[in-house]
Amino acid sequence: MFPRSLQWRLVSFFCLIIFCLVIPIGLYLNGRIESKYYDNFRKRIEKGFEEWSVRNVSHSAEELKAALENSKDIFLLNLENRSYTIVDKNGEIYYTNDKELMSNPRDLAVKSLLASDNFVQALTGTENNKKILESSSGMSFYDYARPVSGNIIYFRYYKDDWAEITRYFNNIIYTSLLIGFAIAFAAGYFLSRTITYPLAKLMRKAESIAKGDFDQELEVKSGDEIGKLADTFNYMATNLKNNLIEISSEKSKLETILNYMTDGIIAFNLKGEVIHTNPASARILGADGLTSFQEYRDRFGFEYSLEDVLYLQSRQTTEMNLSVGDKSIKVYFAVFTDESKKPEGVIAVLQDITEQQRLEEMRKEFVANVSHELRTPLTSIKSYSETLLDGALDDRETAEHFLTVINNESDRMTRLIRDLLQLSRLDNQQTRWNFEKMSLAELVKSTVERMKIEVDSRRQKIECFVINEIPEIEGDYGRLEQVAFNIIGNAVKYTPEGGSITVYIGKIYNDVYFKVSDTGIGIPEEDINRIFERFYRVDKARSREMGGTGLGLSIAKEIVEAHKGSINITSKVGAGTEVTVRLPVSQTSP
């Protein structure tokens, strides 16, 4: 466990430093002291030989023994761990006070001498006297040999006293080492704590951040590297928190956009697995819970496979049309990539173009209706005018009839063009409105009075009732009068002779209304939803006979909605029709 801890590795490092310092120093000092002792041993011997040279000491074996006995102080031979041996010219041991040599037979003693390199060198008549640690019978010593006039004086320095000193010195070294270890351990522990404690705090804070708690901050108490690291950590934590907040906000925005956009979105990874969909995709396709590209392809008949999309996307736009029930859907495919432009998946964008197609059909139908409505009176005018040019002018009665038809058809075209221009201005919001305080009740009653002549001519009955007190509204009198005239006029036109029309005027909540109820031919249920479409007629032939352009109700609806009101129709074939117009009391101009 310790080697994995930075703190214990630092403590171990400090202890290792102490060990690496104390042991080499101890060994060095031990060697220096030992060398000092040996140098003293050698210098004493050499000093003795120098004094002999001054005194001209005789060099016979006997005289050498006597001289050595008299010079023990000089050679330090009075010490128990020092000894000398004299070997004569015959190679025999003449004298020795070495206890080891004396305890052995003569041949073994000579053999022990011959084991010394310094002694063997002296036998050749030269000196070497290298510092060589010898051993014999478990005893260690240094030696010195010098040839003197064919004799050899051989000195030994046994390390008995040095061994004691060495043991004492080693004890000091070991004690110093233990004390050093203790100091290094304590110092290393507390010093490492100053490093590892803030690092441990940083690690705990980092773990909290990794778990999603970004409200983490380290206290900075120093200006060293640890303090700078804490500053950097705090800066990183703050930036990370802000970045994640920003990312979360952007993600929330993106999810909101995806959830509320009208186009459907389906994202697939490279395995074809669904990784995201929005509610619009399920609404458009009418299916939810599909988990793969292949399931969508099998169910809805996708023209392309996932591989086709990935291959074709880089070469051409990948799109296709789908029919799901009564819906028409346009599907666009796009490949999304990573930072290195490597594909990561495919996004399918679904657009419900059912309404667009319906509007396009209505536009085409509108153009066709306009063309037809214009072609019919133009054809009549042309044919009658050609007939007149061919000689019908000579017949006054016929000419007058033809000119009357031409005039009526011209009026019809004028009304049609007028209505088209009015619708165009309403669509483009170019209509100039003249809003003013007005009474809806007076407007409707006035319209009813204007229609009474035609009603009487048809032997119809028309009545008008004001249900309660009607407040004034703000509106464009002329255009609201056009609405009332169109609705009441339609009731009169499509009610048979002897029928009745009833008009009610009242107030409900914050709206005023007028309702026109007739006993006319009625409108089939399947046509009611289309009754406000331009040029839409339930009975086209009858409508044209009555001079209608097919645009009246469309214009009425546009005018009412411009006043922020509503218009509703209920009807039953053979029983009659009821049209209700509601307008808010508080009205501002559009």
Image: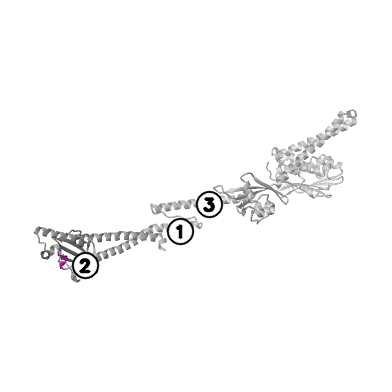
For image coordinates 25% across by 61% down, the residue present is 30
Q: Kindly identify which numbered label has been placed on residue 494.
A: none
Q: Amino acid at mark 3?
A: Ile
Residue behind mark 3: 245
Corner quadrant of residue 412: top right
Q: Which residues are magenta?
A: 90-94
Q: In the image shown, does 144 or 94 lie closer to the viewer?
A: 94
In the displayed structure, 181 sits above or below 285; it is below
| Residue located beneath label 1 in the image | 204
Q: Quadrant of the N terminus?
A: bottom left
Residue closer to the observer: 568 or 499: 568
For this rendering, which residue is in front, 96 or 311?
96
Q: Is residue 92 magenta?
A: yes
Residue 292: in magenta span: no
Label 1 with label 3: CB-CB less than 8 Å: no
Lateral position of residue 202 relative to residue 398, left or right: left
Q: Amino acid at mark 1?
A: Arg
> Looking at the rendered structure, which numbered label has been put on residue 111?
2
Magenta: main secondary structure equals loop
Quadrant hosting residue 559: top right
The 10 Å Cα crowd at callout 1, few under 14, some 14 to 19, many 20 or more, is few
